[in-house]
Amino acid sequence: MSLEENGETDRALEAYRKVLNVDPGQSQLASRVAGLLIEQEDFPQAIDVLKDAIKANPKDADPYQQLAFIYAKYLKKTDQAIDYANRAITLNPADIEGYQRLVEIEVAAGQEKKALEVLDRATKVRSEDANFWMRLGKLYVALLFKSDSQPKPDELKKTNDIFKKAAEHGGDDPAILKDVADYYAASQQLKEAIPLYLHVLEVQPDDANAREKLATGFILTNQRTKAVQVLDDEARSLQRAKKVVEAKASFAKAAANYEQSLLINPNHVGTYLHLAELFLGPLKDADRAVRLLTEARRRFLGAPEIVYYLAIAQSEAKQTQQAVATFEEALHEAQLDQDNDIPNAKFYFNYGATAEQAGLYEKAADLLRKSIALDPTNSAEACNYLGYMWADHNMNLDEAETMIKRALEMDPNNPSYLDSLGWVEFRKGKFDQALNNLLSAAKTADHEDPVIFEHIGDAYFKLNRISEALESWQKALTLDPQNKNLANKIERTKTPIGNGQSAKTNPTR
């Protein structure tokens, strides 16, 4: 895995093949190897690997799905592709991926009627997975809802029934509720869409997009009073945002007063520290904090508080190498002062986090362990940071999992800690388990986090659920549009429905 992530594909393949020679029944690994071979256009070898996996583990559907993909997209042998896709569905009828693969094959072959028959088969599955019904509904929409005509009444009813099941099984999941509401709104069924948008706003009161769509729905159904009420709520939300701006202006005024005070009396340590707190906190101007504290340090030699604050400011300003040196100097100066309590758990946490950002992972681990040892009762954040650092760099995975679970014992519903647990499980190859915890993290979070959605996409990709991976990555990119690595990952992977899905290997970080 490490070789693969470093782009050394040939060496990664060699290592993977050694594993499969001993245990060809590792289907997930076989799929990964096949994906690498496909990227090298070595289709015969890819097919051999997948067929060996089937011989060793004939009840696993994944190799059949990938064989269907190869035969349809690259070998243009539709009959064999359909056969393999049908076998995958027979083995795992509750996996929507199999139906989507078969639909894509039939559509590409010009057999739209047969594609609809595939979807009709899927409606008979007993599944409580909201995502199964959501994706099935979207497949029906792609086939039945044409831009130049309205769907027939029986087609509309059939599609409605699918989305109703998605909503029923989705519970309070705002993403599911919103997708179902969007379907009803797009198909001009506004009376069905409105209650769902209301439910979304109960779960996510600050969802401006849902509020806007709800107001539009009320206007189009002649419920203008309710539309005005919704828009008034949006205005209040904007007013809250305005108060944030006003608060920032107030903090800026306070900072100006502190700066004026320093001109009058530059020998007061506390004024420098209060002003630095404003720059590092609400004003978010780390560079000014660095300049201020550098000046303060020159003025107040032997003041460990100033050096400590300067280290934090340098870390916030992304001057991590310098910050590590300054933290060490703060520690040294604090140890010379017997009455100083700076080297506490919080100090070692901040120092450890900065060391990690500077790439000094062993040093970071030692510092974070000190933080945990000094205050074990309140060490959840440090335990999680240490565990996630190791997981993110594919190091000490067993100890990383232990640390993250320790954090979760102290704070079981913390979405960051759930994401960390999912990520360490991902690194250990436990992709199903990882996905469950990552989805829980997304559901528990009070706001949408691009890192969590990227991790969810990575897990879906490893499970060969390509369309769901792309959907999660796209959501992450919407939240973090400057993430070029994520944009490249999406571009390398996506292929429009009807043309088959790309099997680009390991776009995950």
Image: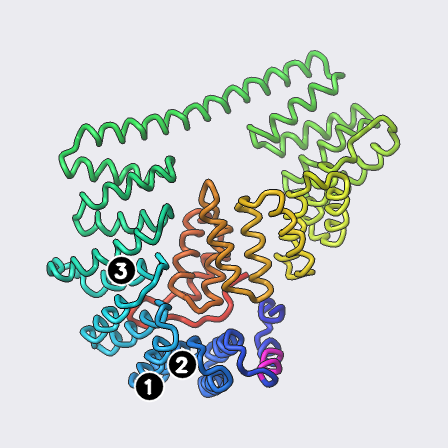
Q: Secondary structure at mark 1?
A: helix
| Mark 3 vs 2: CB contact within 8 A | no
Q: Is residue 295 magenta?
A: no
Residue located beneath label 1 in the image: 80
Q: Residues within 10 Å of mark 3 (few under 14, many from 20)?
A: many
Q: How is the image coloured?
A: rainbow
Residue located beneath label 3 in the image: 137
Amino acid type for the residue under numbered disc 2: Leu
Name which residue lies at 37% across and 81% down: 74
Q: Secondary structure at mark 2?
A: helix
Amino acid type for the residue under numbered disc 1: Gln
Q: Provide the major secondary structure of the magenta segment.
A: helix
Q: Residues within 10 Å of mark 1 (few under 14, many from 20)?
A: some
Q: Secondary structure at mark 3?
A: helix
Name which residue lies at 47% across and 57% down: 456
Report the side of 371 relative to 108 (left or right).
Answer: right
Of residue 232 and residue 195, the one placed in the foreground of this image is 195
Name which residue lies at 23% across and 69% down: 120
Q: Is residue 322 visible?
A: no
Q: Is residue 188 above or below residue 311?
A: below
Residue located beneath label 2 in the image: 67
| Comes first in the chain, label 3 or label 2 | 2
What is the span of residues highlighted in magenta in the rendered image? Answer: 15-20
Report the side of 336 relative to 269 (left or right).
Answer: right
Q: Is residue 508 above or below residue 483?
A: below
Name which residue lies at 54% across and 77% down: 26
Quote the CA–CA distance across marks 3 and 2.
25 Å
| Mark 1 vs 2: CB contact within 8 A | yes
